[in-house]
Image (cartoon, rainbow, N blue to C red):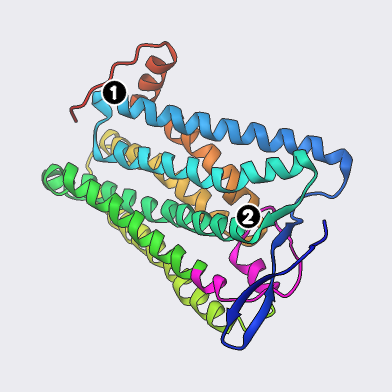
């Protein structure tokens, strides 16, 4: 698809021709594989959205699940739905229409929401680790510290921080110039590929990505690690094996998701990070949690009763 004209914007150096669209070449070029890819992406997307929506529905309709742990889990499920919806529907449209293009504006919008919801997952996992730390290490103060207002404040803070981080990266990309049609070797717009195809100096972008991006991953990871060091230490002091098992079982699902998330952040496994992890989260939490199993069973049987009390 050729460009009939350029998109002009005024920069410090004068008028420069900027790109009108990008081409997403992250998927297979073989026509015989397009149908398989479309069905694979569609099935995974449907499972992701349906599974996470079911988690949110079960938590919202069962008064016994109106606790901080499940409130954070519902927030994580919402973030996963939005995270996957940022990239997969566009990939499905491109496969179906046999077009790989995405507009300049669409690419920046996708980048912003991809960063926001991706970072939201990391921040929520750290918040959930803090919640488990308080529940196991300070059970007598748990209800006071993890009040509904405090939980709402924590989730709101996560949204605000991730939005600011995403806005910073997106604004820095917006300042770059793209001199001609560019090919992005991914099925969505990401920071690294966009910087590579720019014809501007990206040194500032790279430094911000190194320090700010590194902090977004490293700080929550350290918080999770410190929380679990205290949690394991507290569990080991429990005298009975049954008590230790009960205490650890409340953390098993969270640990599984943390391991899956941070284990697939590596670039080589970006497909799993953007598609597979959000799809598996509801299964990990529901299959390893007795209360969630019961709530999901009631939802599937149609026995749903909305309750506003916690």
The image quarter containing residue 148 is top left
Q: Residues within 10 Å of mark 2 (few under 14, many from 20)?
A: some
Q: Which percent across, then down, holds residue 238?
A: 23, 44
**In the image, which disc is placed on residue 62?**
1
The residues tagged by marks 2 and 1 sit, at their Cα atoms, a distance apart of 35 Å
> Can you give x and y, in whole percent of width and height, for residue 42 in the image?
66, 34
Q: Say whether residue 12 is magenta.
A: no
Magenta stretch, residue numbers: 171-198
Q: Which quadrant holds residue 292?
A: top left
Which of the two residues, 227 or 107, is positioned nearer the viewer here? 107
Q: Pointer 2: what residue? A: 270
Against 3, residue 205 (above or below) is below
Residue 212 lies left or right of residue 233; in this view the side is right
Inspect this view and state whether residue 33 appears.
yes
Indicate the quadrant containing the N terminus: top left, top right, bottom left or bottom right.
bottom right
Q: Is residue 289 visible?
A: no
Q: Is residue 191 magenta?
A: yes
Q: Earlier in the sequence, mark 2 or mark 1?
A: 1
Viewer-closest of 130 and 173: 173
Most extreme residue toward the bottom is 13
Looking at the image, which is closer to me, 78 or 266?
78
Residue 186, image quadrant:
bottom right
| Residue 22 percent coordinates (x, y) | 71, 61
């Amino acid at each position: 698809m050729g460009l009939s004209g350029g998109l002009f914007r005024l920069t410090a150096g004068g008028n420069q021709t900027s790109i009108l669209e990008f081409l997403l070449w992250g998927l297979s070029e073989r026509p015989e594989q397009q149908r398989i890819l479309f069905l694979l992406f569609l099935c995974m997307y449907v499972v992701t959205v349906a599974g996470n929506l079911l988690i949110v529905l079960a938590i919202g309709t069962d008064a016994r699940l109106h606790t901080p742990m499940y409130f954070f889990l519902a927030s994580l499920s919402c973030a996963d739905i939005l995270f996957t919806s940022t990239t997969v529907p566009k990939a499905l449209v491109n496969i179906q229409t046999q077009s790989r293009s995405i507009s300049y504006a669409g690419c920046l919008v996708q980048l912003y929401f991809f960063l926001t919801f991706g970072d939201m997952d990391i921040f929520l996992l750290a918040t959930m680790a803090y919640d488990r730390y308080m529940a196991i290490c300070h059970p007598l103060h748990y209800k006071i510290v993890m009040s509904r207002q405090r939980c709402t404040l924590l989730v709101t803070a996560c949204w605000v921080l991730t939005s600011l981080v995403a806005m910073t990266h997106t604004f820095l990309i917006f300042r770059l110039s793209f001199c001609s049609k560019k090919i992005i070797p991914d099925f969505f717009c990401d920071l690294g590929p966009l910087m590579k195809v720019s014809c501007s100096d990206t040194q500032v972008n790279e430094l911000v990505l190194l320090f700010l991006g590194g902090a977004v991953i490293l700080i929550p990871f350290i918080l999770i690690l410190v929380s679990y060091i205290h949690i394991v230490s507290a569990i080991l002091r429990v005298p009975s094996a049954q008590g230790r098992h009960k205490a650890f079982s409340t953390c098993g699902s969270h640990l599984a998701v943390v391991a899956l998330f941070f284990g697939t952040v590596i670039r080589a496994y970006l497909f799993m990070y953007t598609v597979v992890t959000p799809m598996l989260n509801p299964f990990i939490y529901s299959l390893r949690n007795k209360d969630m199993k019961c709530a999901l069973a009631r939802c599937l049987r149609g026995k749903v009763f909305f309750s506003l009390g916690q």
